[in-house]
Image (cartoon, grey):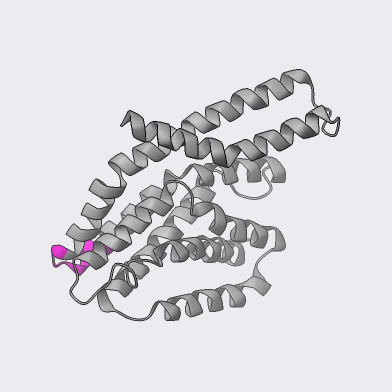
Amino acid sequence: MLQEIREEVVGVVQAVLPIILIIVILEVGGVLRAAPSDLLLFLLGSGMVVLGIALFLSGVKAGLLPPIGDAIGSELPARGSLALVIAGTFFFGLLTTIAEPNIRILAGMLDTASGGGIPSGPPLILVIAVSVGFIVTIGVLRIIFGFPLAYLFAAGYGIVLLLAPFTPPDLLAVAVDAGGVTTGLLVIPVILALGTGVSSVLAGRSALTDGFGLVGLAALGPVIGVMLVGVIYL
């Protein structure tokens, strides 16, 4: 376990270090002109980010990906109840999205930028989470019944194009970003495990061609969900 954590720390440092170096170079070169105390806080925060992400990824890989995600994905279809598959997949996607850190960052920044003018916080998180749960459920049903993934994406992006002219401009931008931040550190591995778990227990299904694609759908769901809120309520 400690070896895995060390490997994650090294990987995160390699990913984050270039950003840290650029900030430091800009500060030393007099471009940013931040106070020394601010630079110190930045370096301290960067260290916390490296350690936090490394521990988070280690925990996800050890406790969520192999044992839980695959088990849920494989056990739900094995029960033989379509209603159970729909309910289980929906709530699994919903609760995973609520726990996604990136969603909370988006909600907090939106509240700050809009001064409360655009609904954010728990209402926005709930809209995004329900959208992900709904569209991931549709994706799992696609795996079960075997209809092409391309049809789902064509229909989904067709809905986006139809809603775009009627969505308030501010909320349209938020909707697009909501789709991007949804597929974060927690949602991606859990949804991937769910898809491959479902496809692994169904005869005639391939974990490669059928198990993947849910993450793309998970990114599309919040775009449609937030746009619908804008069209209906704003």
Q: Is residue 88 left or right of residue 13?
A: left
Quadrant the C terminus occupies? bottom right
Q: Residue, x 28% and y 51% (percent of image)?
A: 69
Of the pair 48 and 94, the residue shown nearer to us = 48
Q: Which residues are magenta?
A: 78-86
Q: Quadrant of residue 47?
A: top right
Q: Quadrant of residue 36?
A: top right
Q: Main secondary structure of the magenta part?
A: helix
Q: Residue furthest right?
A: 30
Q: Is residue 223 left or right of residue 197?
A: right
Q: Residue, x 72% and y 37% (percent of image)?
A: 22
Instruction: From the top left corner, tell me how far across and down residue 127 is, in percent.
Output: 49, 55
Q: Residue, x 37% and y 48% (percent of image)?
A: 95
Of the pair 227 and 66, the residue shown nearer to us = 66
Q: Is residue 62 left or right of residue 231?
A: left
Instruction: From the top left corner, tell me how far across and down residue 43 is, in percent.
Output: 64, 25
Of the pair 110 and 40, the residue shown nearer to us = 40
Compared with residue 202, is residue 113 higher up or lower down, i.e. above or below?
Answer: above
Q: Is residue 181 left or right of residue 200?
A: right
Instruction: From the top left corner, tell me how far across and down residue 174 is, in percent.
Output: 63, 56
Q: Is residue 82 magenta?
A: yes
Q: Residue, x 85% and y 34% (percent of image)?
A: 31
Instruction: From the top left corner, tell me how far across and down residue 41 is, in percent.
Output: 66, 22
